Amino acid sequence: MNDDKHILKTIRVYLPDEDATSALAAQLAPMLCGERPAAPPGGRIHLRGDLGAGKTSFTRAFLRAAGIRGRIKSPSYTLLESYNLSNLYFYHLDFYRFSNSNEWVDAGFRDILQENAIVLIEWPEQAGKLLPPPDLDIHLEYADAGRQASLTAHSNKGLLWLTTLVLPPQASRPQEPHDVD
């Protein structure tokens, strides 16, 4: 859902490489797990961006930072991968292959959008307006050799996460070439 009336705050951060993307995921994971700041565990993150923009890399780093061990598979074909850690449920969904927004309802995914579960959804736009707004929407775009990440809070929980993040210095972003007359 990309409805401006639900936007509480947006920040943009340049991520020069995959390590920076992993570091961002590693900061967010304990927040959703309820470790810090003092907030109940659970939350929804929507991940947007072109193919290869880093959505799955972000999710893998997030799940590793949350304590998930073993193989972390992409749900590109299965649509859903689930994990359990100390009675905390993690759901990683990928709607890339949906051609109709009703497919996510038909697949029964509405039931996993519980308040105390951690739900990461790649390609949420494929579900149209049927998905409720996420707590946090992350849009990754190609920018030079790295990525530009736009993080948008759609709930008070998402706003708390944004205001708790320690962002990398932005001086490291390569300058765009300017036209000279």
Image (tube, grey):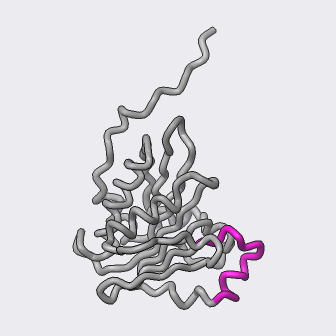
Q: For this rendering, which residue is in front, 135 or 72?
A: 72
* Quarter in which the C terminus is drawn: top right
Look at 67% across and 74% down and name the residue there.
Answer: 127
Magenta stretch contains residue 124: no
Q: For this rendering, which residue is in front, 113 or 72?
A: 72
Q: For this rendering, which residue is in front, 146 or 150?
A: 146
Where, by quadrant of the figure, is residue 71 drawn? bottom left
Q: Position of residue 109 (x, y in %)?
A: 59, 86
Q: For this rendering, which residue is in front, 18 or 169?
A: 18
Magenta stretch contains residue 95: yes
Q: Position of residue 24 (x, y in %)?
A: 37, 55
Report the residue that reaches farthest toward the right: 99
Look at 43% across and 70% down and name the residue there.
Answer: 155
Q: Eyeballing the image, is 84 above or below 134?
A: below
Report the residue that reaches farthest toward the top: 181
Please give the range of residues in magenta: 94-107
Look at 70% across and 88% down and name the residue there.
Answer: 106
Q: Main secondary structure of the magenta part?
A: loop
Q: Eyeballing the image, is 86 above or below 119?
A: below
Q: Eyeballing the image, is 150 above or below 111?
A: above
Is residue 87 shown left or right of residue 1? left
* Quarter in which the N terminus is drawn: bottom right
Is residue 37 shown left or right of residue 11? left
